Structures are given as C-alpha cells and as structure tokens.
C-alpha cells in the first residue's frame, strides 16, 4: 500500500528521530557500563540489545545498570520508549495506516454495462425522492459527487455513484454520458451551466438543469439544457397559493413539479404519533418515502430542517414526494 506524501514524511521523521535517540542512548549506555566497571557489556551488541529491550519496556534483567545515575538513565529510556512506541508510533503511523486500509477506494467509473441510464450530477434532499422512485421502477442511474463524505454515505446506502467533478469531461465520460437516457444537473447555477455545456459537447443527451435562481433559467436554456426546473419558483407558486387560500389543507393544496412529484404543507395534529419525536427519530422518509424540505412554526417558514428538531403540536411540514408518499405522510400527521 502506497502511503500519501504527508504520511511518508511523518514516517520518515519518526524513523529518523527514533534512530537518533537509539544511537544517543547506546553511546550513553557504553559510557555508564564503563563507569560502573561492567566491562563485559562494553560492546555495541550488548549496548544496542539493552537499549532496545529497555525502550520497548521488555527489560529482561540480564543487563542492569546499578549506579544511581545508571538507574535514572534507565528510567529515562523506559519513559522515552513509552512515548515513542505507544504515543508517536501508534498515533501517527499505525492508526492512519489502518484507517487507510479500512477505507475502501472511491469508485470513479460506471460499469461498462450501463446504458439508457440517468446521470445525476450532485446529491441533496431534492434528489432523494427521485432516487427512491428510480429504484422502485428499477431504472439504472449513477450519481456524480465530488464531496467525499457525501459519496461515502451513498456507498453505505449502496447507491450507484462515482467520485468526480461533473463539470469535467472525464467524470461525465466515466459516467457513460454517451449511453445515458438523460442527465440532471443539480449543482449551483454556475456549475450547472458548465455541466450543460460539457455534457452537450460530449453527447446528444437530454439534459435537465435545476436552477437555484429563477432568473438564471434562460441562461441554462441558452447553455443547452432541454428543460430547466426551479424549486424556488415552484415553492413560490405553492406559497402564493397558500397565501390566497390559507385554509387549504391536505393534498388538495399540493403543487406538482417534475411530473409525478408534488410539494405540499401538512399540519401535525395533536394526536399525531410524530409529536415529541425528533426528525431523526421519526424517520419519516424511511416510513413514507416523502422528504421534509422545510417546516412552518410560530408563523415562520424554515427551509433548513435540523435532524434533532423536535416535532411539536401544530408544526406544519413542507414535504415533497409522489401523491402516494404524501398520502402516507398525511396519515402520520393525523
């Protein structure tokens, strides 16, 4: 296994310092046994043997320094050995080595058998419902993600993914863009424009871009996107509908986007089983398939939901999913 350059430098520094300490201790040992009159041990082999056995705290006891200064030196060698072996070696050499060995290399290329698949450039909550639907329909897809932490979480979920920047030719080629059914650009608007330009130059693939700012929709279309979806625009229309008719409840007030997917507000009623649980404990996505993308409490709308947030009576959930997923969520809120 080839270690990273930083680890190799740390290992070389450690070995150099350790070798220097052993040489100095060996010289001091030779001086002390000569001082004590133990001339039978006055040779490099016995000196090195004593230093190594004392440094590693083995201490066989066949060679013993008897003078006070010799005993103090032996204590110093033992303590320095504990620091070198158990402190530096294990912490900076052995542990990183095992961590590197246990971390599986990140995948960088889609299987050659992939065809008519969907490429998703960037993973977030918006894509969770879509991915669930693709899995249910047994549609092949691949996620391109350049965040290593997110990618490892996807690998743990056994979702097909590769490491790379979707703006690079190589990453799109590794995702087999030439054989893809269509591509979803789901990064920032600037990155999406670059993804669209790159993908359209590599293959004649249907491209859907997700726009953060509705003002950039026309620019993404100019770049070559066949379709542009703006979640904020959809959310604005939904909130506008709620403002015109604040008493619309349930799925009747749902706003549809991306064909079968809808966004809806669902109030949590007093007898709901969700009350008193955190979003992490409620595990709503696993139970219903719906995704919580925001909540309304005390009259304010929050689009960032903390997993440790406690669901309280009269909390209003802003959720996305298919009508079936949202209906199951509605049952939980009753």
Image (tube, helix red, strand yellow):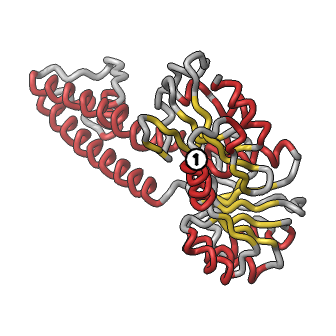
Residue 265 appearing in the image: yes
Q: Which residue is mark 1?
A: 242
Residue 111: quarter of image: bottom right
Horizontal side of 300 relative to 43 (left or right) equals right
Find residue 331 and report its horizontal and vertical position in percent.
Answer: 71, 25
Position of residue 59 relative to residue 254, above or below, is: above
Position of residue 57 relative to residue 84, above or below, is: above
Give the total of numbered labels.
1
Find residue 166 and report its horizontal and vertical position in percent.
Answer: 65, 68
Position of residue 113 relative to residue 45, above or below, is: below
Residue found farthest to the left: 68
Q: Residue at x 82, y 74 (%)?
A: 205
- In depth, the one of 46 and 113 nearer the eye is 113
Q: Residues within 10 Å of mark 1 (few under 14, many from 20)?
A: some
Position of residue 229 relative to residue 51, above or below, is: below
- Of the 4 image quadrants, the one containing the C terminus is top right
Q: Residue at x 76, y 74 (%)?
A: 226
Find residue 306 and report its horizontal and vertical position in percent.
Answer: 48, 37
Find residue 185 and report its horizontal and vertical position in percent.
Answer: 67, 66
Q: Residue at x 36, y 34 (%)?
A: 85
Horizontal side of 329 relative to 270 (left or right) equals right
- In depth, the one of 308 and 148 nearer the eye is 308
- In depth, the one of 52 and 186 nearer the eye is 186
Residue 102 appearing in the image: no
Label 1 SS: helix
- In depth, the one of 271 and 146 nearer the eye is 271
Horizontal side of 330 relative to 280 (left or right) equals right
Q: Residue at x 46, y 44 (%)?
A: 302
């Amino acid at each position: 296994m080839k270690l990273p350059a930083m680890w190799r430098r740390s290992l070389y520094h450690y070995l150099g310092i350790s070798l220097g300490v052993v040489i100095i201790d060996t010289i001091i040992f030779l001086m002390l046994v000569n001082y004590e009159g133990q001339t039978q041990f006055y040779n490099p082999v016995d000196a090195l043997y004593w230093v190594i056995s004392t440094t590693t705290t083995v201490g066989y006891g066949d060679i013993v320094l008897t003078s006070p200064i010799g005993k103090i030196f032996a204590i110093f060698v033992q303590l320095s050995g504990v620091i070198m072996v158990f402190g530096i070696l294990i912490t900076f050499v052995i542990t990183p080595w095992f961590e590197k060995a246990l971390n599986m290399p990140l995948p960088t290329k889609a299987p050659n058998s992939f065809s008519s698949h969907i490429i998703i450039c960037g993973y977030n909550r918006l894509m969770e419902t879509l991915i669930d639907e693709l899995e249910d329909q047994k549609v092949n897809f691949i996620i391109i993600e350049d965040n290593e932490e997110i990618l490892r979480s996807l690998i743990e979920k056994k979702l097909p993914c590769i490491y790379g920047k979707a703006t690079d030719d190589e990453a799109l080629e590794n995702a087999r863009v030439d054989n893809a059914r269509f591509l979803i650009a789901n990064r920032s608007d600037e990155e999406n424009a670059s993804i669209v330009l790159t993908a359209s130059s590599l293959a004649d693939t249907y491209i859907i871009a997700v726009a953060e700012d509705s003002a950039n929709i026309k620019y993404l279309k100019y770049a070559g996107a066949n379709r542009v979806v703006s979640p904020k625009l959809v959310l604005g229309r939904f909130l506008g509908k709620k403002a015109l008719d604040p008493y619309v409840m349930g799925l009747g007030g749902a706003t549809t986007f991306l064909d079968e997917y809808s966004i809806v507000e669902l109030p949590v009623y007093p007898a709901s089983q969700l009350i008193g649980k955190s979003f992490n404990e409620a595990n709503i996505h696993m139970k219903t398939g719906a995704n919580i993308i925001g909540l309304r409490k005390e009259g304010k709308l929050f689009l960032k939901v903390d997993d440790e947030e406690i669901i309280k009576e009269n909390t209003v959930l802003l959720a996305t999913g298919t009508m079936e997923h949202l209906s199951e969520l509605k049952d939980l809120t009753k």
